[in-house]
Image: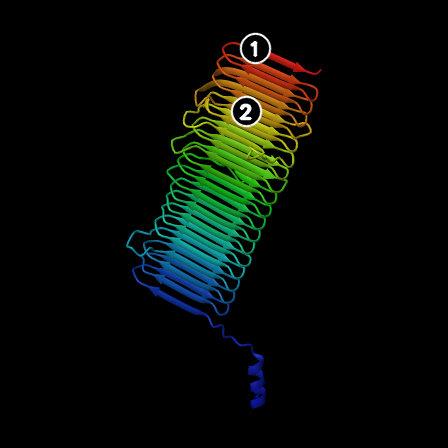
Amino acid sequence: MKTYVLSGASALALMIAVPALAQDNTSDVAQSGSGNAATVTQSGAEGSSTVTQTSVNARATLTQSGQSNGSTITQGGNRNEATVTQSGSDNASTVTQDNGTGSSDDNNSAFVTQSGSDNVSDVSQTNDFSTATVVQANVGNDSAVSQSGDLDNATVTQSGSDNDSDLLQSGNLNSASVTQSGEGNSSDLTQSSGLNNAILLQTGSDNTSLITQTGVGAHTLNVLQEGDGNTSDVIQTGAGNDVGTDTSAGVVQLGDDSFAQIRQAGGLQEAFIEQKGGALNTAFIDQGANASTDHAADIRQDGSSNAADVLQRGFNQRANITQIGDDNSGSGSFAFGAQIIQGDNLGRDNEATITQLSDGNRALVNQQGRTLAANVTQGGNGGNTSTVLQNGNGGAVLLNADVLQNGADNTSLVDQSGSAQTASVDQLGEENLSEILQTGSGNTASVTQNSDFNQSFVNQAGTGHTATVTQGS
């Protein structure tokens, strides 16, 4: 058997060759109450961990394998669970399952995973049976989740960079999902009543979404933004409102510099906005007051520089706007390229549709009354203007207007009051003018302009009149 003796110099060299094992991690665990369990694993460097359990049968699990990560877990109440995994660097996580006032704060679950760097996550759960899941996998993301209701569910996934998400749930049985995979996106989602559902997906850059669901009702909401510089603002109050049913519906913006705003008050309302394939699109839907019900609005824009506005008051109303061409924008007395205004609290069972298939068209439909129908279609070479007024100070009943502009630079005015009126306008040429004025009841007017530079004026007052005008061949 051979024995080797190392010299002093050789031993010193061996010690220098061995890498330093110091990792400078810090862990602080404080437990009171009964039956609590805390597991802290720090295999990274310069990690900091604080676990405080003043609860009963709480579970806290922390795993740090990155560098300079910080985690704080505070648990009160009974049977709360918190799991935090940090494998990146310079991440910060705070989980609070205790409001400090002696309330129950029971059976909540929080799961936080941070694999990027410089991410910040804050989860607060101060009631019962709520679940929060936060996943951050890139750089510089910020997430705040606050749940003060019961049986709420929140999921935040940030795989992009420099995104900001604020999610507040203060009612019961709310569900929210926020996904940010682009850069510089901002989301502010508030659910302050019960049975709300919200899905928000931001995959582009510099998108902003503000969503507020309040009142008592089962609100449903979906927003998808994939372009750059899109802005979405949705506020729902009342009950049973619906913006969309999945991530392919709701407020969908795929172009650049789009703006969409949906505000619903009342109950049982629907709204849908889709803007894609273009830039500088604007859409606005505002439906009813607190006493209004059963509205539905649909806006679709494909192109650039389009604008649409739907405002509905009363109940049981329907509106639809479709713009496919470019540069459909309003000027003068028109606030928007396409605008629908339906009634007040006296309105009922009205339906309006505006379809713009070419460029530079302007259309306005204003309905106040009961059982009103208006349809405007603008194609051809564009530059057409159509105005449909159906009101009579809230006393209009059974009015019908149909306008087709398939030429260019045509102008049509249909003004109906009274009851049981019918007006039809077809403009197939260019630079034609048609005006139809109907008062009284039971009148019918039809105007067809097949050639250019024609003018037609129809004025019907009384009962049971019929007028047919054909210009050109």
Residue 57, by quadrant, is bottom left
Residue 238 in sight: yes
Q: Amino acid at mark 2?
A: Val
Lateral position of residue 121 relative to residue 278, left or right: left
> Which corner quadrant of the image does residue 348 belong to?
top left
Query: Picture coordinates of residue 111 (x, y %)?
Result: 45, 54
Q: Secondary structure at mark 2?
A: strand
Residue 196: % across, % down:
42, 40
Colour mapping used in the image: rainbow
User: Earlier along the polypeptide chain: callout 1 or callout 2?
Assistant: 2
In the foreground, 108 or 240: 240
Pointer 1 local density, CA inside 10 Å: few below 14, some 14–19, many at least 20? few
The residue sitting at 70% across, 16% down in the picture is 472
Q: Nearer the viewer, residue 201 or 433?
A: 433
On screen, 27 above or below 465? below
Q: Which amino acid, mark 1?
A: Thr
Residue 7 seen in the figure: no
Which x, y percent locates residue 64? 48, 64
Which of the image's four quarters has the C terminus?
top right
Residue under label 1: 466
Using the image, determine if residue 52 lies above or below residue 341: below
Q: Position of residue 16 (x, y in %)?
A: 57, 82
How far apart are the two marked residues, 1 and 2, measured between alpha carbons? 19 Å
| 349 or 339: nearer the viewer | 339
Decide if residue 230 is on the left or right side of residue 381: left
Residue at the image position 41 percent from the left and 30 percent from the top: 292
The residue under label 2 is 388
